[in-house]
Amino acid sequence: MLENVGHSALYIHVPFCVRKCRYCDFVSYPYNESNARLYVTGLRREMELRLGDKHEKRWPLSTVFIGGGTPTCLSTKLLLEIITLIKGYYNLSSDVEFTIEANPGTVDAGKLSSLRLAGVNRLSLGAQACSEATLRTLGRIHTHEQTVSAVWQAREAGFDNINLDLIFEVPGQTLTEWERCLEQVIDLAPEHVSAYGLQLEEGTLLKEQVDSGLLQPCEEEDGINMYQAAINILQSAGLEQYEISNFARLNKQCRHNLVYWQNEDYLGLGPAAHSRLRRVRMSNETNLTDYTTRLNAGMLPVAWSEDITQENDIFETIFLGLRMTGGLDLERFKQRFGRSLNEIYPGLVESLVNKGQLKLRGNHLCLTPAGMLLANAVMCEFAPV
């Protein structure tokens, strides 16, 4: 059993999908009822092992995120079992942010109503695109009409915090199509939008199609223009950019993701889930059989772990902090590490400010608009040597 570390963020990985998308390299398996039942039984056992003595005080949670995979490909009954487990083993704060990811093709009015009544108060819909051609290229199982329907059904169920995930730089996608999609998304009045540039990951069907010449990748300049269009259009609609890829209305930033970007502790449960607990990073077994076998033997299903050195902790705190438009809190950084950023990297901040890539805003260090376009290169200036 791990020591009670008092974390406040819980991630549950649901490793099932109706069908794997062509761009996805996350761990997921085709859904079937028997494996889903095996998974939920394992999840219960993992919670028991994590907490140990049932009389021990349960960890408090301020955010819960059920992701995947496609959590909503599970039956409503199994989803409610998972939510009941979470409530049974953890103390949820009165203002908990409780998110579930969903594919628009795997929800209906009944399922959404049940989830909302069970305490889920934030819905993250994987819209990804509005054009049917782009949805086909991505290998999605839903249509834009289903996205529209899912949003309205969620509103009817009482959800007042909805995120829509979008992807740009898709092969065949044009700037005009992307701008039209952004306008269509705005018409749905979401509280939050995540807009990600497509990453062609090794081992995915989409990368194989690009590498073989069946599909032509998006030109770099087009990708930059699409990203700028997202910033302009979404912010004009009242969705302020608060992280490189994320936009939200007032007080609707994703609190769970802020835990990641502030490099704080979180617990991940389920196959392939990752955790960061007291400067230890770990990940669970990815294979469902291996995951359940270890649990049945009374062992945590941790496949890999490493201690996070202070050097890496410093870099990751900077890297993640600069992703947020509010920037890296320099006072908080000094309190955490006992030294100022300038003490650790003498002259580097001044150099990047002079290059127009970083700026100081009060007690925060932020990327400039120019720096945001070169974000990874700027952040890597702080990499351990």
Image (cartoon, grey):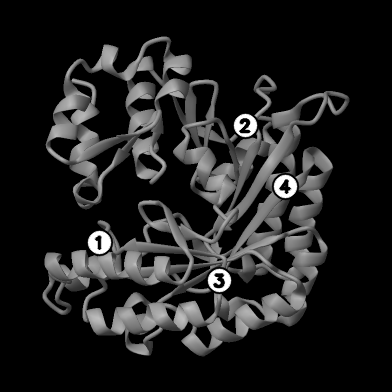
Q: Label 1 amino acid? A: Leu
Percent position of residue 283, x then y: 49, 36
Decide which of tag 4 and tag 2 comes sooner along the chain: 4
Question: What whole-number distance in Å separates the C-alpha atoms at marks 3 and 2?
Answer: 39 Å
Query: In the picture shown, does residue 42 fall above or below 204?
Result: above
Number of residues whose C-alpha sits closer than 10 Å to that of mark 1, classed few (under 14), some (14–19) or many (20 or more): some
Query: Mark 4 sits on what residue?
Result: 96
**Which of label 4 and label 2 is nearer to you?**
4
Decide which of tag 3 and tag 2 comes sooner along the chain: 3
**Which of label 1 and label 4 is nearer to you?**
4
Q: Residue at x 63, y 44 (%)?
A: 292
Decide which of tag 3 and tag 1 comes sooner along the chain: 3
Q: Label 2 amino acid? A: Leu
Decide which of tag 1 and tag 4 comes sooner along the chain: 4
Query: Mark 2 sits on what residue?
Result: 300
Q: Residue at x 61, y 86 (%)?
A: 149
Quarter of the image where one finds residue 352: top left
Q: Label 4 amino acid? A: Val
Which numbered disc covers residue 190?
Answer: 3
Question: What whole-number distance in Å separates the C-alpha atoms at marks 1 and 2?
Answer: 33 Å
Percent position of residue 106, x then y: 61, 77
Query: Mark 1 sits on what residue?
Result: 200
Quarter of the image where one finds residue 1: top right
User: Would you say the residues marked 3 and 1 are in contact, meaning their CB atoms lie under 8 Å apart?
Assistant: no
Percent position of residue 268, x then y: 58, 40
Query: On the rendered image, what quadrant is the C terminus found in?
Result: top left
Question: What whole-number distance in Å separates the C-alpha atoms at marks 4 and 2?
Answer: 26 Å
